[in-house]
């Protein structure tokens, strides 16, 4: 399925300007639902500037309205931007994140040993020599390498990591692991986030109509019973 040219910025705009569910936004933008939740909570490392996909002629307002009316509706793009295909060579990583690569590689080796060095090289954007050095603990800085989730470090996306894990598991004849981190709390979290957004919109409308919101105390009165 085609994806918006700037999926994260598009997701940020949809979170702020539509009533679409997180699942619909994640599916349309080609992102993991955890990434959408992070954008909605403003827990991403950088505040994203929204990109309007309607003005970019990637989806119509009617299509967004259909999705808002039906949580199970899957939005369709008007057109997909021409995908840029990477050729041979590792993925480009910004200079600011390159020092995090060994930590991300170590995390993958520890948690997903079934992933090949070639797949790690494409996923993280590194060389097989570096991966081998970390794997056999001969890396020059091995004492300071701490396994950290490469998604959290911003070296890859959750969707790309999940795809690499699934592919490696299939090649090894293993059952691909299922992400159950939010299995029990996902619906509660989504309901809470939706309730907060609804309340914020109601408060904004109340103020716009001339109302004055009560000032909440910073601390509870310890003598109040």
Image (cartoon, rainbow, N blue to C red):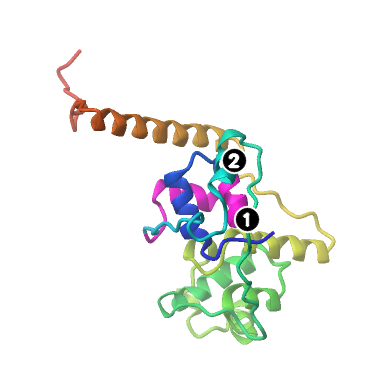
**Mark 1 falls on what kind of element?**
loop
Mark 1 to mark 2 CA distance (whole Å)? 12 Å
**Quarter of image, res 30:** bottom right
Q: Is residue 47 above or below residue 24?
A: below
| Residue 36 covered by magenta stretch | yes
Picture coordinates of residue 139, whole percent (x, y): 54, 83
Q: Are marks 1 and 2 in contact (CB under 8 Å)?
A: no
Q: Is residue 149 visible?
A: no
Label 2 residue SS:
helix
Residue at the (24%, 31%) spot, across then down:
207
Secondary structure mostly taken by the magenta-highlighted segment of the chain: helix
Give the quadrant of residue 125.
bottom right
Q: Is residue 211 left or right of residue 178?
A: left
Tag 2 residue: 67
Residue drawn at the location 63% of the way across and 85% of the way down: 89
Q: Residues within 10 Å of mark 2 (few under 14, many from 20)?
A: many
> Is 169 or 164 nearer to us in this picture?
164
Residue found 62% across the figure and 76% down from its top: 84
Residue 95 visible from this viewpoint: yes
Give percent across and percent down for residue 80: 63, 64
Residue identifier under label 1:
77
x and y, in percent, of residue 122 in the image:
64, 76
Towards the viewer: 134 or 206: 206
Residue stretch in magenta:
24-46
Q: Nearer the viewer, residue 213 or 142?
A: 213
Question: Quarter-wise, where is residue 96 in the image?
Answer: bottom left
Q: Is residue 50 left or right of residue 149?
A: left
């Amino acid at each position: 399925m085609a994806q918006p040219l700037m999926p994260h910025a598009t997701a940020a705009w949809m979170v702020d300007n539509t009533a679409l569910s997180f699942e619909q936004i994640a599916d349309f933008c080609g992102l993991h639902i955890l990434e959408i939740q992070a954008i909605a909570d403003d827990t991403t490392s950088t505040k994203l500037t929204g990109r309007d996909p309607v003005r970019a002629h990637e989806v119509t307002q009617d299509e967004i309205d259909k999705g808002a009316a039906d949580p199970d509706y899957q939005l369709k793009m008007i057109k997909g931007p021409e995908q840029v295909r990477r050729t041979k060579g590792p993925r480009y990583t910004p200079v600011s994140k390159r020092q995090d690569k060994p930590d991300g590689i170590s995390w993958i080796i520890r948690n997903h040993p079934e992933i090949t060095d070639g797949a790690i090289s494409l996923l993280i954007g590194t060389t097989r020599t570096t991966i081998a050095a970390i794997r056999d603990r001969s890396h020059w800085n091995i004492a300071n390498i701490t396994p950290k989730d490469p998604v959290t470090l911003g070296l890859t996306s959750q969707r790309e990591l999940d795809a690499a894990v699934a592919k490696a598991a299939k090649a090894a004849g293993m059952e691909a692991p299922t992400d159950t981190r939010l299995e029990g709390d996902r619906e509660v979290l989504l309901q809470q986030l939706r309730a907060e957004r609804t309340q914020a919109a109601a408060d904004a409308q109340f103020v716009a109509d001339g109302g004055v919101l009560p000032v909440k105390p910073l601390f509870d009165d310890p003598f109040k019973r």
